[in-house]
Amino acid sequence: MLLNETHDPGLPSWVASAHKADTDFPIQNLPHGVFRRRQSKEAWRGGVAIGDAILDLTAVAALPSDERPMDDEATRALLAASQTSLNALMALGPTAWHALRLALSRALRVGAPQAAAWRSCLVPQAEAEYQLPVEVGNYTDFFTSSHHALNAGRVFQPGRELLPQFKWLPIGYHGRASTVAISDTPLQRPAGQILLPGQPQPVYAPTRQLDFELELGVLVGTGNTLGQPLPLAQAEQHLFGLCLLNDWSARDIQAWEAVPLGPFMAKNFLSTLSPWVVTFEALAPFRVPLPRAEEDPPTLPYLDHPEQVRQGAIDIALEAQLQPAGQASLQRLCLTNYRHAYWSAAQMLTQHSSNGCRLQAGDLLGTGTLSGPAPEQAACLLELTQGGRRPLTLPDGTQRHWLEDGDTVVLRGWCQREGAARIGFGECRGQVLPHAG
Ligand code: MN
């Protein structure tokens, strides 16, 4: 994807908070979400984050047309983006997404003649609450970090090598769209069937091995026709954007149930998404080569494309933090990066459609746990504690084998490099509540 005037790191905005050094939402980002004022009866509606505010797209759409200088394509995208979910916008495709981004970027710049009118369309983020930005039709979780695959495999079976198929195809499983929820949704500790050590038979009990997984959620924009695979060269044009995703997991339930068919009840009790969707266009300045080593097997032609090798990966720093039960401070659990994933988002989409399976606007593809090569880049407790065998000690001395009741997990992500404006994802948060019942 090419850089254009919306990526210019020198663009000034008349929204002063968009210039704070640590803001996730400068004018070069413009992520989409769905919001309303907290504790209000207002309608849910689409907005774009700018600095510490939200540009209310229903308010922009209601301005007189001379205060809203947009071509037909951008106007159509604006109306779609202001609805109670982003699905209609996502279904319009990349030309419309770009037209809206360009129009919003121009109107939010210093000197835009409509600044005075648009200022009345801002809502402080501090006053907002969010709902899921998309109606998720289907949810598939992949397994794209070879570091996670290797480390997690070794917890269950010491010395195990990477499974032979891992570097031939992006592996995934079908999850549950119905238990995808927005950031800040509390997680009640789930119960399930668990085989306790040394016991002859399993029990049904609250999980003792509750974990987080730091992932990104890839949101499908335009889908494909049933029976028609999406070629890799075109796959990325079908992808709308990325959000943070916490794929909460119960490792004791997983260990008992997962062989031979893979994750089931250990994963489908809650998957938490961040409110803001960062578009692939906003991420264009942060593209990097896919990680490939001399000894890696060849990639089959349908999953291979020079553009993907050259810039299929994205440099996104990803952090998980723990706010331990009863404490105010946040402690770092891990700091990793999306650039270490072996398979790109486009390769995930191409693989998913490779047998003709139909993908649709609003489908969610999880990247899988995004562990990197270094130990502190392990992106779940299963790896950080070697399956609970060795506690993780946090900077303030707090120790954890697994998540405890009252713990809050916060995920963050951001992109930063010389010559580009820093952009971020906001946060994805969830607190563990005691098992009920
Ligand atoms: Mn996962």
Image: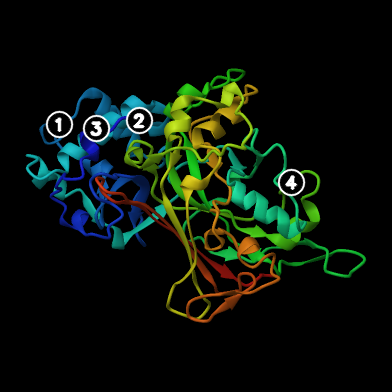
- Foreground tag (1 vs 2): 2
Disc 1 marks a residue whose amino acid type is: Pro
Of all residues shown, which one is farthest toward the right?
A: 200
Label 3 secondary element: loop
Per the image, the residue denoted by label 4 is 262
- Work out how far the residue at label 3 is from the one at label 4, CA to CA, in angstroms: 43 Å
Which residue is depicted at the point 53% across and 77% down?
325
Label 2 secondary element: loop
- Foreground tag (4 vs 1): 4
Comes first in the chain, label 3 or label 4: 3
Q: How is the image coloured?
A: rainbow
Disc 4 marks a residue whose amino acid type is: Gly
Which residue is depicted at the point 39% across and 39% down?
287
- Work out how far the residue at label 1 is from the one at label 3, CA to CA, in angstroms: 19 Å
Per the image, the residue denoted by label 1 is 69
Disc 3 marks a residue whose amino acid type is: Asn
